Image (cartoon, rainbow, N blue to C red):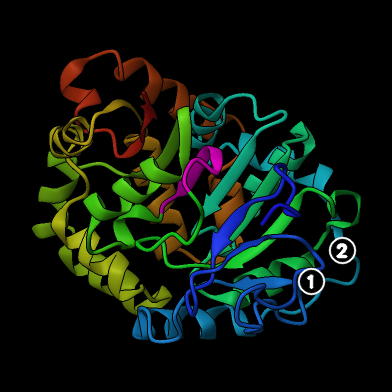
Amino acid sequence: MDSISDTEIRFRCLACGAVNAMEPSALACRGCGLRLVDAHGVFHLLDASSKAEERAFYDSAYAGSSAEPAKAPITSLRELWDRADAPQNQLLYRVTGDLSGKKVLLIGNGASRKELSFLEQRPLRLVYSDLSPNAGQAIQKQLDFLPYQAVIRFAAIDAENLPFEDASFDVVYGHAMVHHLPDVERFLRGVKRVLVPGGRAVFMDDAFSPVWHYSKQTWLKPLMKYSHRKTGISPEDYRFSMSGGFKESELAAMMTGLGLQPFFQRACLLDYLWTRAAVKLLPRRLYTPLTSGLPMRALVRLDQALGRLSWYRGNQIRLVWGFTKA
């Protein structure tokens, strides 16, 4: 225990409870000798039976990922935050804030790459995690992590059973993943535990939009079914879509009940509907021309202007939310 550096992220072995550190050289549990790390350097920190059906879905989704001809540099990822067809990314980046010198946990990051540009801010440690170990293996085939070997760690974890020690992280971040969880309050309780006092949790999910929910249940229902058949949808995403999204009042009650200080910011309605229609219903070759350039920027500006109206803001779909731990 005394030999574990304070700069390393600590976790408990699920088999014996011994405390271990996410050191590159830590291949086996200090207590029971159980193998913890696979050949790709991904820490396996979840029970094999945990969320077996969901994990199988994502294991399959990431298993086919292949290496790019040349691994892309981390510096190439910063532009992903500024995509015209995803204006919520800029809001999310601003809310996440400065990560320099901090310990950061990315939960359920899957195939998302933009968050790895956080490495350029020089956090003390950045843990990339997902339910499937194949996600961590796949992302390493695509990007050049060599300059950040001392900082980056990869792990397979269950978000509802975080294996890390108390007060392990300054920031916990999750993009479009909380809606996958059957017990959100349990998840938030775990996030609170692993955050340091004053630490911050930042998430992005879809909010309940009365206009959008009504449309999906009525005149847009045939198109929605067609798009699901065309592009596929995970069981968790389908259930969340049918429920209509997160309601801020319910999330706020949950967080304040845990002694947390919640925050919420919304973005995107018209621009969201336009890009969703383009990606789901039109040929792939038409997506970029229709979601970039002057028309898209004008649509984003219109959405931002209308967002000053309370009725419109209450129907914006992208929800950047989270809390600060007292």
Horizontal and vertical percent position of residue 27 = 74, 76
Q: Main secondary structure of the magenta part?
A: strand
**Is 241 left, or right, of 91 in this rendering?**
left
Please state the total of marks drawn on the protein image.
2
Q: Is residue 76 above or below residue 260?
A: below
- Badge number at residue 71: 2
Q: Is residue 9 magenta?
A: no
For residue 112, say whether it is visible. no
Residue 290 is situated, as x and y percent measured from the top left of the image, at 54, 47
Q: Can residue 160 be seen in this view?
A: yes
Give neighbour class at mark 1: few <14, some 14-19, many 20+ (Cα, 10 Å): some
Instruction: Name the mark on residue 165.
Output: none
- Is there CB contact under 8 Å for labels 1 and 2? yes
In the displayed structure, 267 sits above or below 230; it is above
Mark number for residue 141? 1
- Front-lying residue, 152 or 66: 152
Please name whichever residue, 226 or 4, is drawn nearer the observer in this view of the structure. Answer: 4
What x and y, as percent, mark residue 167? 49, 40
Whether residue 168 is in magenta: the answer is yes
Q: Give the range drawn in magenta.
A: 166-176
Where is residue 241? Give x, y as percent: 23, 59
Amino acid at dot 2:
Lys
